[in-house]
Amino acid sequence: MKYLLIICLLLISCNKEPKKNLSKDKAVLMKNKVIENTTILRKSGFFKNYEKLSNTEIFKKLHSIRKIEYSKLFEKEHDPGMELDEFDLACLDDTKVIFIDLEAGVCKENKVYEEVINLHSKLTDYVFNPKNIKETWNSETGSIEVEFELDKKKINFKPEFRDDWLDEIVFRICKEKIKEKNIRIVDCLGDDGYGFGQSIAIMRLTKEEQENLEKQFKWKFAE
């Protein structure tokens, strides 16, 4: 999962570097806004892993995790801060969101299709739980075959080689199999309805959870 984790961290951190001279008052306002957005997201099922924590405690926990992850990424101590909008905040819960750049460094060595399938498994709290995932390349440019076992059945598909880019067939296959488990996942298109360029955001939401986000954040969804 390391390769996609790096990509996700860079996506979230894009234009979000902490300002060195952030005033104390602005820092307090920023913190309060993140805590307010945490309250809204929790009403849509986010941060269930921290259900025993207060919103302020969740803020501190997420900040601590971000410092550890970014320090590993940059191989030195690094504090990315918590200057996050509501979408960036939501993306910190990978049990509810997959946010990924389709230009994902796809190649024989990186096994990105395996990682994407595992991300979908985590998204469903492992109810969709494929076993023995294998991504096989016949050469550096394909052909590619992906196979996994699900409920004692073998699922396989052949993504097209598109240089660094993911073939979206992997998302269709996962969505289809997750739907069979009666788990609802939807594509988030942001507050303007146009999506995120070459990146996509997939969220596990009930209809009621989605309606809360539509009302509070004005987010739009593909369904």
Image: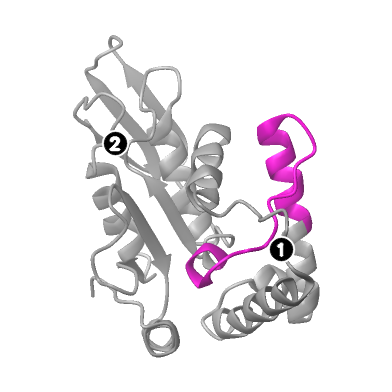
Q: Is residue 147 above or below residue 176?
A: above
Is residue 80 one of those drawn in magenta? yes
Residue for badge 2: 166
Mark 2 is on which residue type?
A: Leu
Scheme by which the image is coloured: one colour
Q: Distance from label 2 to label 1 (Cα)?
A: 38 Å
| Residue at image point 32% right, 41% down | 102
| Residue at image point 36% right, 60% down | 178
Query: Of the residues under marks 2 and 1, which one precedes in the sequence?
Result: 1
Callout 2: SS: loop
The image shows residue 74 at horizontal and vertical percentages of 68, 32
Inspect this view and state whether residue 52 appears. no
Residue for badge 1: 22
Please report the bounds of the magenta region as a residue range: 64-89
Mark 1 is on which residue type?
A: Leu
Is residue 20 one of those drawn in magenta? no
Callout 1: SS: loop
Inspect this view and state whether residue 15 appears. yes
